Image: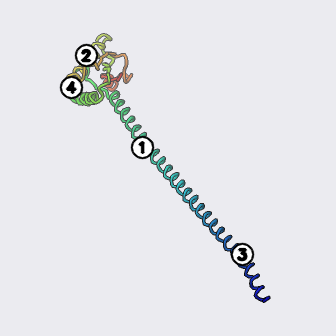
Amino acid sequence: MKKKLWICLSLLLVIPGLMIVTSCAKKTVMADLAQIQEDEAAKLAAEKAKLAAEKAKQEEITRQRSLDEKRRIEEAARHKIIAARNLFMNEDIYFDFDMSDLKPETQKILKGKAEWLRNNPGESVIIEGHCDERGTNEYNLALGDRRAQSAKNFLINLGIAESSLTTISYGEERPADPRHNETAWSKNRRDHFVLE
């Protein structure tokens, strides 16, 4: 009977001990499973945040490249406009000695200027008539005026508004080349165009 008593006592001690151990183990497993889920959720959130940050960075790079390209295109267009304006103003027309008639090559230049003026309708032009140093001041002022008027009339006949064209004569006062020879004189017999 003592043996049965010992077995019963042993069972009474072992069974509750096993219950305690197994119930604690389940709590630990449950706690570990909850921690694992939390860690996975945190990793997933961090990964999502990293992907969102990378996407935002790529979008910013793309936006910046687009802005840079737009600026480059605008800058190129601005340079093109400046170059066209400079060409318009720096391309003079030349006349023969004591003449105000337009030569064929002069008419070709004026046709190009008329085309540019049609494409830029807000522009106004001063046509400056110039002469070489030969002749009196009064004669050269009148000749410079005839040269400027000749170019103005040609442009008007090509459809340019008269209100956008102004003439002035400087006679021999503003030589392009101050030397006193035929090469210099041929450079000074000209109409010069200034955009206002």
- Cα separation between marks 2 and 4: 18 Å
- Can the viewer see residue 181? no
Which labelled disc corresponds to residue 158?
4
- Can the viewer see residue 157? yes
Asked if the residue under mark 2 is in contact with the one under mark 1, i.e. CB atoms within 8 Å, the reply is no
At horizontal 27% and vertical 18% (from top left) the residue drawn is: 163
Rendered image quadrant of residue 195: top left
Of circles 2 and 4, which is in front?
A: 4
Q: Secondary structure at mark 1?
A: helix
At horizontal 37% and vertical 24% (from top left) the residue drawn is: 177
Of circles 3 and 1, which is in front?
A: 3
Type of amino acid under label 4:
Leu
Going from N to C along the chain, the mark reached first, 3 or 2, is: 3
Q: Position of residue 176 (x, y in %)?
A: 37, 23
Q: Which residue is mark 1?
A: 69
Rendered image quadrant of residue 14: bottom right
Task: Give the position of the N terminus as an image quadrant.
Answer: bottom right
- Cα separation between marks 4 and 1: 38 Å
Asked if the residue under mark 4 is in contact with the one under mark 2, i.e. CB atoms within 8 Å, the reply is no
Q: Secondary structure at mark 2?
A: helix
Going from N to C along the chain, the mark reached first, 1 or 2, is: 1
- Number of other residues with Cα within 10 Å of mark 3, as a class: few under 14, some 14 to 19, many 20 or more: few
Indicate whether 132 appears above or below 70.
Answer: above
Going from N to C along the chain, the mark reached first, 3 or 4, is: 3
Asked if the residue under mark 4 is in contact with the one under mark 3, i.e. CB atoms within 8 Å, the reply is no
Q: Which residue is mark 2?
A: 146
Type of amino acid under label 3:
Pro
Which labelled disc corresponds to residue 190?
none
Nearer the observer, 174 or 179: 174
- Cα separation between marks 3 and 4: 114 Å
Going from N to C along the chain, the mark reached first, 3 or 1, is: 3
Going from N to C along the chain, the mark reached first, 4 or 1, is: 1
